[in-house]
Image: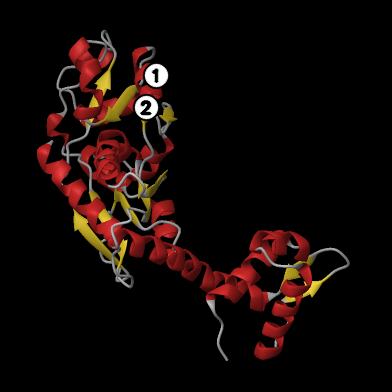
Amino acid sequence: MNIDIKQIRMVEALARHGNFARAAKELHLTQPGLSRAIKSLELSLDVTLFDRGKREVSPTAYARHIIQFGTPLIRGARRLVRDIQLIKGNDAGELTIGTGIIPAEAIIGKVIGRLNKLHPRLHIRVIVERPHALFEMLRQGQIDILIADTRGNEMAEDIEVTPMPQHSICFIVRPGHPLISQKDLELGHIFRYPIATPWLPENIFPILATKTGMDPAFLAKFENGLVECNNFKILLEVVRHSDAVGCGLDSIYSPSLAEGGVIALPLGNAGLSTHYGLVNLRRYSTSPSMELFKSLLLETIQEN
């Protein structure tokens, strides 16, 4: 017995809608036609895929397994069609990119702009999320390629990591902040104040503990305050109007540093840096749109 993509789509749509009429409408089928197709699949598999109520249906464990296994196939089939069009020169591929907040702020827009200029009909979706969420989405087939902090994931056998240049983390404060006049300033001193930072990878705390000599559990509590946000404009305003210490990259904060709106603390020897990589799943061959994105990203990084 075989299950094809069309049947997987039927099972997925019916489970999502919970109703034959609504699912049939989405699939451009008649309600009796969908009902017969599902019943035929159940007979061929010798299982019950849906428990039928008077108006609604609910998926059984068998249907849920088909959906879990088959949803990436549906996405892959859709991408395959669009990538074939791209190869043919019809400029209509599809690409979903996952990224952490720092790459999103620092470089992704420029790369996608170049990609869009070359292939204006290419469908591009960008998802900005925490690293652990991005890796989960990659493995579930919800994104094609990601740029994120790879610490703790480098040895995973199911992924391929292309290393990216790393950049030192800078720390900024408002003019007149008490740390500016701090003698023998050390990294641990910033934790006396609220920290304004983008999402932090969980594995950063043992690194901070090594650098500061402080307990990682204590550092993770941020007992003197934490402002965690995926928007650097908000973080910058927090720093300007409080005693919070901002974390980021010089390239992100450079306009405000040049204007004097914030000041970089002299902690260049703190030894903290980004640890970003370009990641895709090993078991899938890369599509033309992924290869093009990779090459443009690495080219853009070399220019900066």
Element carrying mark 2: strand
The residue closer to the viewer here, 39 or 83, is: 83
> Residue 255: x and y, percent?
22, 18
Tell me, yes or no, if residue 153 can be seen here.
Answer: no
CA gap between label 1 and label 2 equals 7 Å
> Residue 227: x and y, percent?
43, 28
Task: Residue at 33% x, 73% y: name it.
Answer: 283
The quarter of the rendered structure image containing the C terminus is top left
What residue is shown with label 2?
196
Q: Are marks 1 and 2 in contact (CB under 8 Å)?
A: yes
Q: Residue 246 carries which label?
A: none
Tell me, yes or no, if residue 284 can be seen here.
Answer: yes
Q: Which amino acid type corresponds to the residue marked 1 in the rendered image?
A: Val
Q: In this view, does 14 lie to the left or right of 153?
A: right
Element carrying mark 1: helix
What residue is shown with label 1?
238
